Amino acid sequence: MLQGILLAVAGLVIGGGLGYAAYYFYGVYTKKSASRDAAHLLEEAHTEADKVQKEAALASKEEIFKRREEFEKETQEVRNELKNLERRLTRREDNLDQKADGLTKRERGLEEQEKKIVERDEESKTNKQQLTQLIEQEKDALAKVAGLTRDDAKKLILEKLESEVQHEAATLINKITEETKEQADAKAREIVTLAIQRCAADCTQEVTVSTIDIPSDEMKGRIIGREGRNIRAFERETGVDVIVDDTPGVVVISSFDSVRREMARRALEKLIVDGRIHPARIEEVVAEAKKEIEEVIREAGKEAVLEADVHGLNSKEVELLGRLRFRTSYGQNVLRHSIEVALLSGIIASELGLDIQLAKRCGLLHDIGKAVDHEIEGGHPTIGADLARRFNERPEVINAIAGHHEDIPAISPYTIMVASADAISAARPGARGESLERYIKRLERLEEVAQSFQGVDLAFAIQAGREIRVIVNSDRISDVDAAKVARDISKEIEKELSYPGEIKVTLIRETRFVEYAR
């Protein structure tokens, strides 16, 4: 019994010890596991914190880069605007310098001409006195020696003097011509200036000025506004010059940019009809007119593309073509001229078996530089070629645009084709403000003036009336007299006819000797 009790107590003691040991070891294991979990969580927290920190730094850098790009873009736009303003001011200064140089040259030329006239008057007076003395001496000598009557002597002297004066005049003309050849550069500049002066008035008025009728002169005051605020606001919004002078019922809008001028014309007409003219209203109406003009330009470009049957043009090219609707050249609308050149080029290409679509494309775009030549320096062929390169046009198209005035060598037949079509469209009768009937009458009158001179056998007007070939009788006109006849014909043409530019008089004198060998 006691032994059983002892065994039970021993079992309880051993069981308790084993339970305690198990509890102890379980606690140690649990602590180690918890430590490992805590370390793992701490490591994940550090990793997450590093990731969040890197993402925040990256977002901050992206924001800084974005802000920097926006700032650089705004800065570049401001720089471009300043450059455009600088170029415009430079062009305006150049134009003013050219005009000043032209006026200075004209003044010098007039002074020289005045000096020559005074010298010639004095020389004429001296010659007249000498001739009078010679005539009296000849009269006395003839009366004594030949026993002629006074009338016979007078007739003989006059014939002799006429022959001498004609010879001296012809010699003088040859001398002046030689002096002019020695001063070829100065003479060339004078001729160019003269040509510009003769055609500048009508052309400048046609392409730079628009007139608007107003109901009453009271409207002029409303257009000007108090202390000129309305007209200043209008000019600032449109970029044109408004001329309000004493001419009754008319306001003039002046600008070299034809699109701006048309926009300003529409806006001012709307303001006059509306009657409410103040800076805020001016800004609204100008914005509406600008949208209308942009729509008109787009529609004009689309219509031109459809009429010429040219496909695949860039939308910007279509817009530039539409701007040509408001551009004229010597009275000829440039957009209609471009369409005509495209159609002519297509016809020529079909006859030669070449690509008709490519020829039309070259012809339609050949004057595209004129849409922006008032904004960019250079000639319209160069500007147009640069635009074509920007729009990834084919090399044939670029060369046709740049070389249609023979500024650069042609690399394809399309360049020569477009140049020919351009000359046909510009030089044909009636193309530039002159009807066929007036054109023919002018050529006939030119030939009649030349044929009215003695010794002239034939006269032919060529080069659309820019040159006249005169064939004279070699038996009646000598080489010395030929120069005088050519000059007299040119002076008569200047007096009788009105024409732009200049007319070249080419006089031909030929002596033929024919023998037969038998």
Image (spheres, rainbow, N blue to C red):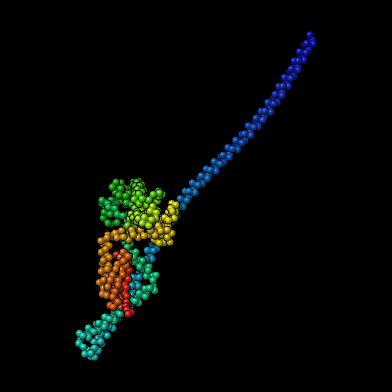
Q: In the orientation shown, which residue stands out farthest toward the bottom?
A: 145
Q: Based on the displayed image, in which of its 4 quarters is residue 134 positioned?
A: bottom left
Residue at 44% in and 52% down: 392
Closer to the camera in the image, 479 or 56: 479
Q: Is residue 378 visible?
A: no
Viewer can see residue 145 = yes
- Quarter of the view holding residue 116: bottom left
Query: Residue 281 or 41: which is nearer the viewer?
Result: 41
The front one of 230 and 187 is 187
The image shows residue 417, relative to residue 158, as above or below, that is above
Q: Nearer the viewer, residue 74 or 305?
A: 305
Give the percent coordinates (x, y) of residue 189: 38, 68
Image position of 81 (left or right of 169): right
Q: Quadrant of the N terminus?
A: top right
Residue 245 location, x and y as percent?
29, 56
Q: Residue furthest front?
A: 518
Task: Pick out the residue farthest to the right.
Answer: 3
Q: Is residue 39 left or right of residue 340?
A: right
Q: Residue at x 49, y 49 (%)?
A: 72
Residue 234 percent coordinates (x, y): 35, 51
What x and y, as percent, mark residue 437? 25, 61
Placement of the C terminus among the 4 image quadrants = bottom left
Question: In the image, what residue occupies the spot 24% across and 88% down?
Answer: 142
Q: Is residue 248 above or below residue 288?
A: below
Q: Residue at x 38, y 73 (%)?
A: 181
Tally of numbered tags:
0
Does 473 appear above or below 260?
Answer: below
Q: Is residue 77 left or right of residue 195?
A: right
